[in-house]
Image (cartoon, rainbow, N blue to C red):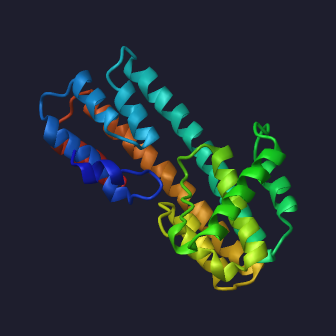
Amino acid sequence: MTAEAEQTVDITEMPLEGIAAYWLSLKKIMGTKVTAKAAQEEAERTEEPYIKYLLETAFTGLTDEQFRRVCVIRAQTSLDGLRQRLGLMREAHLSMAAGENPRKSLVRMAACFPCQHMPEEKITRMALEMVKKARSGNTQDYLVTVDTRMPADQLLVKLMFYVIWARHEGTSTIEPFAESSRCVFFREGLTLVSDGFDRSFIKTCLDARYDGILHEAERKMAMAAELATALRTRCSYEDMFAVAQAYL
């Protein structure tokens, strides 16, 4: 795969057609020489966690039934993580829109964790340090990237930065910090907040977007698992294309 493809493969951000094209290009490149070594090498160049897992697992000693079963389990694990991270972002957006006390926002977002690993005091301190750094320089040059792949506690700290900044500096000043964010859901929510829409309208929009992202992610993972199985069983390119077409 090209360096550009390696950077853009993403279950949540890439369209279904893009995920299909990724697996079909792998088949075209590998041809009849589909091996565990080739799959492992591709896995090492891939950042997308679910696709990396499929590549790393497809050519192990698992039976076809076992492989399909672990694909489903891993997909559910990935979806649970995505659900948590999108939920945290949504709560941060709604807190910013309401001009809520950051302490209250943190308590509600912390409730998204089965157990809180990082103390609230530490989260607040780290977020305040980021705010201090942003205030000390040009805000146009200080970017706080939010990504669904980052650890949830790290994401929480970054979201608290946005909540605190919006509370003290106003919602109209927050968008420039997210210019490099790879997460469309976060960027869209931040735009709604900075445009001054009311909280209930923002919640309606984000709820619909949240459900749509999760539904599409589930479909993409199901298709990716089927195409990984086809690659594993050394199906022809034409047969893999037929599998992909069922999802498109």
Considering depth in this image, is 247 or 12 the residue closer to the camera?
12
126 w.r.t. 210: above or below: above
On the image, which quarter does residue 92 sit in? bottom right
Percent position of residue 184, x then y: 51, 66
Percent position of residue 17, x then y: 32, 58
Q: Is residue 97 left or right of residue 108?
A: left
1 w.r.t. 179: above or below: above
Which residue sits furthest front? 136
Considering depth in this image, is 204 or 150 the residue closer to the camera?
150
Q: Residue at x 70, y 84 (%)?
A: 197
128 w.r.t. 195: above or below: above
Quadrant, the N terminus: top left
Considering depth in this image, is 169 or 27 the residue closer to the camera?
169
Residue 201 appears in the rendering:
yes
Percent position of residue 20, x then y: 30, 51
**Total count of labels:** 0
Residue 94 appears in the rendering:
no
Q: Is residue 187 left or right of residue 225?
A: right
Q: Is residue 122 left or right of residue 5?
A: right
Q: Residue at x 38, y 43 (%)?
A: 224
Q: Residue at x 84, y 70 (%)?
A: 100
Which residue sits furthest bottom? 196
Percent position of residue 237, x then y: 17, 42
Q: Is residue 84 left or right of residue 108?
A: left
Quadrant, the C terminus: bottom left
Q: Residue at x 16, y 44 (%)?
A: 238
